[in-house]
Amino acid sequence: MDNHSEYKIYYYRNSRANRAPVLEYIQKISTKDRAKIAAYIILLRDCDGRLDEPYSRYILSGIRELRVEFARNKHRILYITVEGKKIILLHAFLKKTPKTPKQEITRALNNLSDYKVNKNLIEYEKEI
């Protein structure tokens, strides 16, 4: 694993509400869960956005799901990797069903569409 990855992590920021849904999600969860998510995000960056199961799974339209499980919590962060060595965190949720709910995928797709038009991002900082 290369600790000097050129890849950078970004939070998608909604162009209308000027909110970063993944950042807001992470800030609301427990400190322990937050630390585990941060470790997985750094692993994702260090692996150039390419993680296989059980860490990540392909969803659709270039969107992948970062799978962070801690105790009984199953956090999911939907993300894409784009040109310019950018990993963009689009949407996050707490998974409570066996399959990824369609409405969560739809939110990520809507965020991706907004990103493609507005390119509105916040650079990820390790200390979340």
Image (cartoon, rainbow, N blue to C red):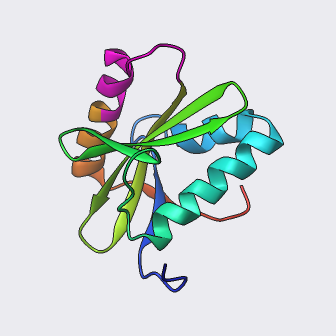
Q: Which residues are magenta?
A: 95-108
User: Where the C terminus falls, by quadrant?
Assistant: bottom right
User: Residue at the location (57% across, 33% down)?
Assistant: 75
In this picture, residue 83 sits left or right of residue 128: left
The x and y percentages for residue 31 are 82, 43
- Choose between 71 and 35: the one closer to the eye: 71
In this picture, residue 29 sits left or right of residue 121: right
User: Residue at the location (51% across, 86% down)?
Assistant: 4
In this picture, residue 78 sits left or right of residue 27: left
Residue 81 forms part of the magenta stretch = no
- Choose between 99 and 63: the one closer to the eye: 99
The x and y percentages for residue 110 are 28, 31
Q: How many numbered marks does the figure carry?
A: 0
User: Residue at the location (30% across, 59% down)?
Assistant: 81
User: Residue at the location (28% across, 43% down)?
Assistant: 63
Give the residue at the far right of this rendering. 31
Residue 50 sits in which quadrant?
bottom left
53 versus 48 height, above or below? above
Is residue 19 visible from the viewing direction of this image? Answer: no
Give the residue at the far top of this rendering. 97
The x and y percentages for residue 124 are 56, 62
19 versus 81 height, above or below? above
Give the residue at the far front of this rendering. 54
Is residue 40 visible from the viewing direction of this image? Answer: yes
